[in-house]
Image: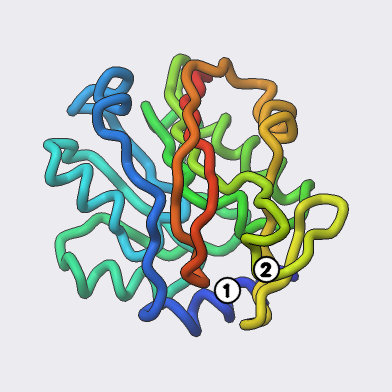
Amino acid sequence: MNSSTQQEYWNKVAWDKTFTHPLDLDRFSEMVTKDANILDFGCGYGRTIIELNNAGYNSVKGVDTSLNLINRAKKVSPDIDVQHIEPAQTPFESQSFDCVILFAVLTCIPEADHQSNLVAEVKRILKPGGILYLSDYLLQPENTREAAYDQNGVFTISEGATFRHHTIDYLRVLLKDFVSLKQNPVSVVTLSGNSAEAIQCFFEK
């Protein structure tokens, strides 16, 4: 699935989908101070930003490649700091952020080289010692998923969108330039309403 097709899908479903990856505020607050400059990359409709703002984090920005998701975020919370970007483009200076959040973003990027490009961009905009907070889907048992995987964990759902699930080993290799701090499994609900297993990890640049 190319970038334009991905954008078309998210613009089509922007007002209908509910994102479910939980924000672990206890662990987050151990690593990220309230005055930190934070970027929610792939912020969707701003759910995580609003939760962080309510917890006292007041310097949180969000970007997303779906204009309709950004419009939804602004309607939900008019004061939210979000902006639309094109794929593989960020408007930020190097070493701009103390923390970058990637919640169910890699799953929306099935191509390995595009994932690597995103990780490189995250590394560029993070300050030395900055925190990457990642939450994403693991490979699911055959009887719990909607569509069959290819050899890389890529699959296409009935709505026509293509996604990718991962092994922990694959994520470790993808993020080899970061220091792994903590990880724990979490249960989430997919966009199709199915229960799924995910992993949440904290990394340091």
Q: Is residue 135 above or below residue 194?
A: above
What's under tag 1, amino acid-wise? Gln
Q: Is residue 4 visible?
A: no
The residue at the point 55 percent across, 64 percent down is 86
User: Which of the 4 image quadrants contains residue 169?
Assistant: top right
The residue at the point 27 percent across, 43 percent down is 60
Q: Is residue 70 above or below residue 64?
A: below
Tell me residue 29's x, y (percent). 25, 24
What residue would you read off at disc 2? 3
Tell me residue 8's x, y (percent). 58, 80
On the picture, is 197 further left or further right than 120?
left
Tell me residue 25's x, y (percent). 25, 33
What's under tag 2, amino acid-wise? Ser
The residue at the point 54 percent across, 46 percent down is 197
Q: Is residue 115 visible?
A: yes
What residue would you read off at disc 1? 7
Q: Is residue 199 above or below residue 113?
A: above
The residue at the point 46 percent across, 26 percent down is 202
Q: CA distance from mark 1 to mark 2?
A: 6 Å
